[in-house]
Image: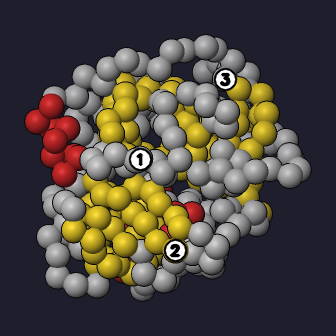
């Protein structure tokens, strides 16, 4: 496989990460070339900035069947809460009858995140929290119907799909997305501490703040990634954690629950 040149420009996240990028083969093969990360001082929160070697336009349509898209949207929720300094908000989605997945940096320092399910405000608690993969799982504190769990799939380079995320609108926005490539992101966790890394996806999509934790779905409605970052300055490059990282977090619940970490 021929590795594409990557220039690491700066870092900052809907979570903070400094990257080394392992360019994966189509379909997630193990071969690739590691491009060392640059250490960038004084990064602002929230976006990993990588300049792709090639320029590709964001797709103007996702091609997902409207009925299928409605089912995915029905299982996508708004997440909000107060941390040590300010109000936080993001997106989440149902992964089990009593579990919602979102970004760890969305709920860091929040004792009882609130999710909005079909217009109803539901109190939850954090039962799994991984600052390295930037993922968290929430469980409602009462009896509530969350909707049908979304099914996880495998990301595929070159595939077109959609991001379903909450911004300022009442319902989730649907944004076409292109899986540009599969990468291995290493460097720091959401608290800026040295960390091992996570499997991620480089996407082309026009996302904004508040979309963190949103599901990235393929043409079959399968969740292939969880959004965590965007290009600072209004660019169309975005990043998602691969679905395999979420599957591992869900499996880890069998070993016990883990509350949210401190504020960032």
Q: Is residue 248 visible?
A: no
Q: Earlier in the sequence, mark 2 or mark 1?
A: 2
Residue to which mark 3 is pinned: 52
Q: Earlier in the sequence, mark 3 or mark 1?
A: 3
**Residue drawn 79% across and 33% down?**
9
Mark 3 to mark 2 CA distance (whole Å): 36 Å
Observer-nearest of 198 and 25: 198
**Secondary structure beneath disc 1?**
loop
Q: Earlier in the sequence, mark 3 or mark 2?
A: 3
Observer-nearest of 108 and 159: 108
| Occupied quadrant, residue 8 | top right
Q: Dot 2 surroundings within 10 Å: few (below 14), some, or many (20 or more)?
A: some
Q: Is residue 189 visible?
A: yes
Mark 3 to mark 1 CA distance (whole Å): 26 Å
The answer to whether the residues at label 3 and label 2 have Cβ atoms under 8 Å apart is: no
Residue to which mark 2 is pinned: 82
| On-image quarter of the N terminus | top right
Q: Nearer the viewer, mark 3 or mark 1?
A: 1
Q: Position of residue 215 (x, y in %)?
A: 37, 47
**Secondary structure beneath disc 2?**
strand
Q: Which of the numbered marks, if any, corresponds to residue 167?
A: 1
Mark 2 to mark 1 CA distance (whole Å): 17 Å
Observer-nearest of 93 and 29: 93
Observer-nearest of 117 and 6: 117
Residue sitting at the far left: 67
């Amino acid at each position: 496989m021929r590795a594409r040149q990557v220039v690491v420009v700066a870092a900052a996240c809907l979570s903070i990460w400094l990257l080394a990028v392992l360019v994966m083969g189509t379909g997630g093969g193990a071969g690739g070339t590691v491009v060392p990360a640059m250490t960038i001082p004084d990064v602002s929160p929230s976006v990993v900035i990588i300049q792709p070697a090639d320029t590709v336009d964001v797709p103007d349509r996702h091609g997902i069947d409207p009925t299928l898209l409605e089912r995915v949207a029905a299982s996508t929720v708004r997440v909000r809460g107060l941390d040590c300094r300010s109000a936080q908000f993001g997106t989440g989605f149902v992964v089990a009858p009593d579990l919602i997945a979102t970004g760890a940096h969305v709920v860091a320092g929040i004792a009882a995140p609130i999710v909005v399910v079909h217009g109803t405000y539901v109190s939850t608690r954090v039962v799994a929290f991984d600052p390295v993969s930037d993922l968290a799982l929430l469980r409602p504190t009462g009896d509530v119907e969350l909707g049908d769990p979304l099914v996880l799939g495998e990301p595929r380079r070159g595939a077109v799909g959609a991001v379903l995320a909450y911004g300022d609108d009442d319902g989730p926005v649907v944004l076409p997305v292109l899986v540009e490539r599969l990468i291995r992101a290493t460097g720091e966790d959401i608290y800026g501490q040295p960390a091992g890394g996570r499997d991620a996806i480089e996407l082309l999509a026009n996302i904004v703040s508040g979309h963190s934790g949103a599901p990235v779905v393929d043409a079959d409605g399968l969740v292939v990634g969880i959004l965590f970052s965007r290009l600072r300055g209004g660019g169309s490059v975005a990043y998602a954690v691969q679905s395999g990282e979420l599957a591992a977090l869900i499996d880890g619940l069998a070993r016990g629950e883990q509350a949210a970490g401190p504020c960032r």
